[in-house]
Amino acid sequence: MPSETFFRLPQSKQERIVEAIKNEISQSAFDSFSIGPIIRQCGISRGSFYQYFQNKEDIYLYLISDYQSHILEHGRESIRKNGGNFFATFDDTFRFAVRMLCYKDSKAFRHNLFCNTRLYEMLWRRDKFFKEDREKLERLNEVINTDLLRVDSIEELGVLMDICLVTAMKDAAGIFMADDSEQTVLSHFLPKLELLKKKYQKAA
């Protein structure tokens, strides 16, 4: 993740650096990623760049976390709008996430960022990264209206959330692995969510 030095930069300079990073990722796989084109495009020194990011792992994790933060923020707003309804929120947030994954940034950038086995190795090694992600999800669980669900405990709610997340991530991966369209991904996942809804949501 970026250092505090990066976040103290003027917003315009942060955006210029991130745009240059995305341009490089759009053109290069993880193993061939280089900061040379980035520092030339931004007119900064190599030493300055390493004051912002320790290495390319930091860069990739930051870009992934940007996608995650947008999805989680949408989820928080959706829970509020849907009165804590788990399935309505998951449906709405999945649609938002798929739309973003299909259209945010260039196709080449998204492919090189997500179709990267090294990235997932990094994520597994970064326990803190997963811990923070899990804590954010648990905070969402706290505002879910369990009176609408057939679950007996917060632990069972967590299991239901895990089932939905794993299934959602598998189907969303088709965007990058098989060039699936937004509609194709939705047609794969939403029937599964509906089946879970029949099992776990109480009748109105």
Image (cartoon, rainbow, N blue to C red):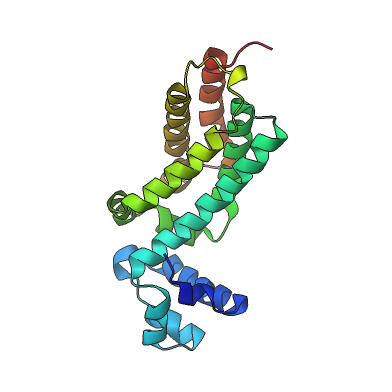
- Where does the image place residue 92, in percent across and percent down from the top left? 64, 35
Q: Residue furthest top?
A: 203
Q: In the image, what residue occupies the spot 46% across and 36% down?
A: 171
Residue found 29% across the figure and 66% down from its top:
31
Location of residue 11 in the rendering, given as x and y in whole percent from the top left corner: 61, 75
93, above or below 54, in the image: above
Q: Residue furthest right?
A: 81
Answer left or right for 91 relative to 31.
right
- Quarter of the figure that contains the C terminus: top right
Residue visible at 52% across and 72% down? 7
Name above or below for residue 90 compared with residue 197: below
Q: Quadrant of residue 156?
A: top left
For the N terminus, which image quadrant?
bottom left
Q: How many marks?
A: 0
Nearest the viewer among 68 and 180 is: 68
Residue 202 higher or lower than 113, as above or below: above
Front in this rendered view, residue 146 or 176? 146
How far from the left and from the top, in percent, is residue 145? 62, 25
Identified at 69% across, 29% down, the residue is: 83
**Residue 139 visible, this orientation:** yes
* Image location (x, y in percent) of residue 74: 63, 45
Residue 178 seen in this snapshot: no
